[in-house]
Amino acid sequence: MSDLPRRAVTRSAKLAALPLGFAGRTALGLGKRLGGRSAEIVAQEVQQRTAEQVFKVLGELKGGAMKVGQALSIFEAALPQEIAGPYRATLTRLQEAAPPLPVSTVHKVLTEQLGDDWRENFLSFDDRPSAAASIGQVHRAVWHDGREVAVKIQYPGAGKALLGDFAQLARLGKLFGALLPGLDMKAVLSELRERIAEELDYFREAEAQHAFALEFDGDPDFHVPDVVAANEMVLVSEWMDGTPLSRVIADGTKEQRDHAGLLFVRFLFCSPARVGMLHADPHPGNFRMLANGKLGILDFGAVNRLPGGYPKAFGQLTRIFNQGDMETVVSGLRQEGFIREGIEIDPQALRGFLAPYVEPTAVEEFTFSRRWLQAQAANVADLRPTNVVRQLNLPASYVLIHRVHAAGVGVLCQLGTTARFRDEVIRWVPGFADDPNDEPLAIG
């Protein structure tokens, strides 16, 4: 990782430069405005340059800055393609090019975590990593009882780098306040910090993975490899072979892509009801199609704990939206915190913004496509003050739910899946089915 800024002084200097640069561009914008340019055009240019610098700095850093950069990708739809596109490419390049730990470091971590006799736990251990990510890497091995296992090893110092970055990243609140004035960025960052701290806790990840493995043991649709052993920085799980979802996206038949997409949605919607948790990192690398037709799921470091299942208001407001009662929808969104106090929303503009996202729940069968997604992104890429997306807030309790839905829709559009998604929402999302015995949504 020598090509990435690691020293605390360097990292802090890069992150601290963000607010200073923003102030400079704001002054530049004021000068242009005094020179006769319209305030709206100047404001849009300042916002775009601000976003460009934020993404550039985040993309250059590993650790917390990069993780927050990935989490902030949920707001990419509100930014111009010329800004968001290069940023996405930078993050992808950083992840794919993450250099593996030296073998000596791998052995040192295993010794520290499992003891000097760590090799006695394994019949064999492959020193070459089979996968690498932002905070750790995975090695293939054979456990002492003959089971093939995946050994996940956390990078030394990853925790300190991740959490240390957040002290500086708190400054981003004002920056994104300029981009999205309806957003309480401080609450969002606080929620993300807590969730990322959980990702560093391999004991907590092991607990979540074991709960999923127990619930889906013998399930006709899903397979979750169980945990074999865990320590602070090492997690050993059963090995799982299968076809990565990325390969299904690239080479799968229409039938295979439809099947994979339906199981993908079913897993995300049923998990809160069945396990009390939502898998919060639904990118293709964490899913496999198994030879028996099941969907295999990996990586439970990021989960949203929802002991009562999906929030009931989520299903109720979706149903009410489909019924056309925008007054109740606006009141409900305000009550849930999506519209902050003092922010006024045009109900019809809100309807136009939300309609495409609710569409898959309003019809018997729906086809996701890249073209459809591009059309939705175009609807919210307008940064003018009149754009309704800039007036909306993302409550902390919905941060991971929104992240999952945004990423999940992206995966479905890559798959081009056609399926009866409405059936899954009716079955698994509380409040969506129009039950005459159900209590009405409490609008205060």
Image (cartoon, rainbow, N blue to C red):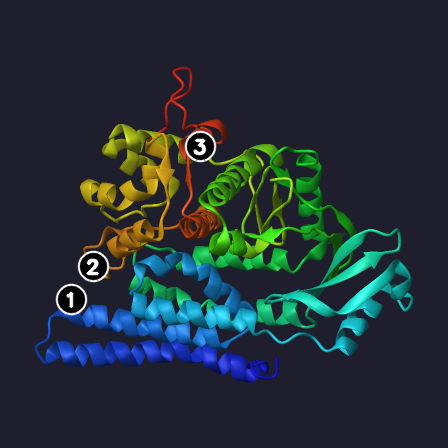
Where is residue 133 drawn, in percent x and y?
Answer: 60, 66
Disc 2 marks which residue?
385
Where is residue 310 drawn, in percent x and y?
Answer: 49, 36
Q: CA distance from mark 2 to mark 1?
A: 8 Å
Mark 2 vs mark 1: which is more N-terminal? Answer: 1
Picture quarter with the C terminus: top left
Q: Nearer the viewer, residue 219 or 334?
A: 219
Name the mark on residue 40.
1
Disc 3 marks which residue?
425
Give SS at disc 1. helix
Give SS at disc 2. loop
Q: Residues within 10 Å of mark 3 (few under 14, many from 20)?
A: many
Q: Nearer the viewer, mark 1 or mark 3?
A: 3
Amino acid type, residue under disc 1 in the picture = Glu
Q: Nearer the viewer, residue 210 or 147?
A: 147
Where is residue 246 drawn, in percent x and y?
Answer: 52, 56
Vertical relation: 139 (above or below) 219: below
Give SS at disc 3. helix
Picture quarter with the N terminus: bottom right
Q: Residues within 10 Å of mark 2 (few under 14, many from 20)?
A: some
Where is residue 292 drawn, in percent x and y?
Answer: 64, 40
Q: CA distance from mark 1 to mark 3?
A: 41 Å
